Amino acid sequence: MGDKLAEAKELMKLGEKAMNKKNMFFKKSPDWETAADCFQKAAMIFRQPNVKQLPEAIAAFEKAAESHGKNGAHFYAASAMENAGNILRDMKAMAAAGKHYEQAAGFFLDSGKNDKAAELILKAAKTMADDDVDLAIKHYRRSIELYAEDEQQAIFIGDTWRQCLNLMVKHDKKEDALSFLDTMFPIFEMLGQAEYLHKAQLSAVILHLAKGDSVAAANARDSFREFAMSDEGEAASDLIDAFEEGNEEAIRRLVTTQTF
């Protein structure tokens, strides 16, 4: 461990030296490429199981990300920042990990990797859900927007919208959930994802019923085109009937047989 730790510390010194390099006129002229390489190598050593200096590894990855970013290597900056976030996540520092994932996503966007940016924003949402519900919801919605921009990436929306909706419902954000579903309907229609569309529409009906408003639930059901002919549409009608009849057993049975 001793030799490796000493090597990592020496690399950090070399990285700092490259960051503060001066030209022949004694003006600061950083060598960002060399700095990034030194910090990256140091971080990898600090992270090794036989060294395991995790705070130092995080700091080194952060400096590597900064140096890569200054050098215009945004993809590598994103990867370094994600590595720092992963360490923080494993240390159970969830809020800090989420912040690092946010920054990594920004670097991926700068590098034109929207799919990776969406993935990192989603990681931020999951990581921050227990600490900042509203920000987690914002990140879920942003990741969906990015996934929807690429038809090949749209397959990831299926799990993401359910996770976002479940988080809203868990924290009794029914109005926010209904507004969220309103934004999802056209996305599912645009992508031709009828199955998800019908499940989202049924979710809207259930949310209205959860608010005690069977009239709004019926109006929502009737406003959805082709919904009535789907299995979810039939379930929605049965749920509304059971609600108006006060048949709690039927409501429980109908809800538990649906897969969202």
Image (tube, helix red, strand yellow):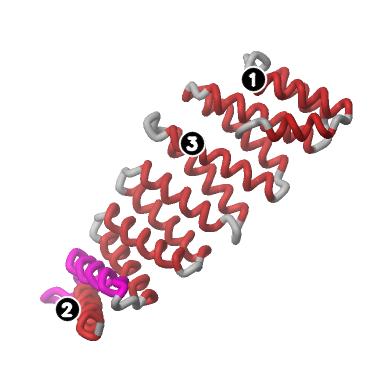
Magenta highlight on residue 31: yes
Alpha carbon distance from label 3 to label 1: 21 Å
Q: Position of residue 205 (x, y in %)?
A: 72, 29
Q: Position of residue 50 (x, y in %)?
A: 29, 77
SS state under label 2: loop
- Location of residue 5 by image quarter: bottom left
Specify which label sits upstream in the sequence, 1 or 2.
2
What residue is drawn where x is 71% and y is 23%?
235
Residue in the foreground of this view, choosing between 224 and 246? 246
Q: Which residues are magenta?
A: 20-49
Q: Which residue is mark 2?
A: 26
Amino acid marked by disc 3:
Ile
Amino acid marked by disc 2:
Phe
Specify which label sits upstream in the sequence, 2 or 3.
2
Alpha carbon distance from label 2 to label 3: 53 Å
Nearer to us of marks 1 and 2 is: 1
Q: Position of residue 111 (x, y in %)?
A: 30, 48
Taking 155 as reference, is 2 left or right? left
